[in-house]
Image (spheres, grey):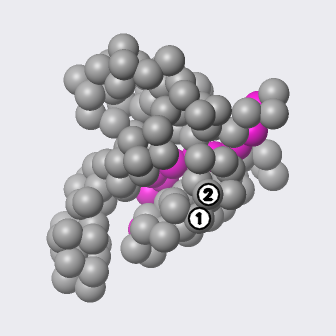
Amino acid sequence: MDYQAARGYLLSRPEAVEDFPFGPGVAVFKVKGRMFATLGVENTVARTNLKCDPDEAQALRDIFSGVLPGYHMNKKHWNTVLLDGSVPDGEIERMMDRSYGLVVKGLRKVEREALELAYGSGAIYR
């Protein structure tokens, strides 16, 4: 998965928006104002930060060399995923979906329920 494919997938999530609060080098993807991913390039390698369940976060780091503790993030809850081919695209998409779902679960009840009603739980929590 390359930068453009990752960007497109992140923006395909219901009501996802792209913002650049840290400057033009790092895209931040949000749902209802809450960040669920970042996307940038460092040393010509695209990378994304994704929210993750703490137990799963460590397991993914153990399995994939391209999954690291979240860069500039709470390392218990965030992973950095290198888009260098070391992690299969399907797994990256699954991690993106999981990050989005975890953030939606943390939204205020009225915001969460509005998303679930508009798009269905299956689309929100893939």
Figure quadrant of residue 52: top left
Looking at the rendering, the stretch of residues picked out in magenta corresponds to 32-42
Crowdedness near tag 1: few (<14), some (14–19) or many (≥20) residues, C-alpha within 10 Å: few
- Pick the residue in front: 59 or 116: 59
Counting from the top left corner in percent of width and height, residue 118 is at 26, 85
- Pick the residue in front: 53 or 123: 123
Which residue was labeled with disc 1? 8
Which residue was labeled with disc 2? 5
Q: Is residue 47 above or below residue 2?
A: above
Placement of the C terminus among the 4 image quadrants: bottom left
Q: Residue at (51%, 60%) from the top-left corner?
A: 10
Crowdedness near tag 2: few (<14), some (14–19) or many (≥20) residues, C-alpha within 10 Å: few
The reply to whether dot 1 and dot 2 touch (C-beta < 8 Å) is: yes
- Pick the residue in front: 23 or 41: 41
Q: Is residue 114 visible?
A: no
- Secondary structure mainly formed by the magenta segment: strand
Is 97 displayed left or right of 71 in the figure?
Answer: left
Q: Residue at (59%, 64%) from the top-left corner?
A: 8
Counting from the top left corner in percent of width and height, residue 50 is at 46, 41
Q: Amino acid at mark 2?
A: Ala
Counting from the top left corner in percent of width and height, residue 21 is at 69, 53
Q: Is residue 15 above or below residue 86?
A: below
Residue 84 numbered mark, or none: none
Q: Is 106 included in the stretch rendered in magenta?
A: no
Q: Residue furthest bottom?
A: 118
Label 1 to label 2, Cα distance in Å? 5 Å
Q: Residue at (58%, 54%) from the top-left corner?
A: 6
Is 4 displayed left or right of 53 in the figure?
Answer: right
**Element marked by disc 2:** helix
Q: Is residue 19 visible?
A: yes
**Element marked by disc 1:** helix
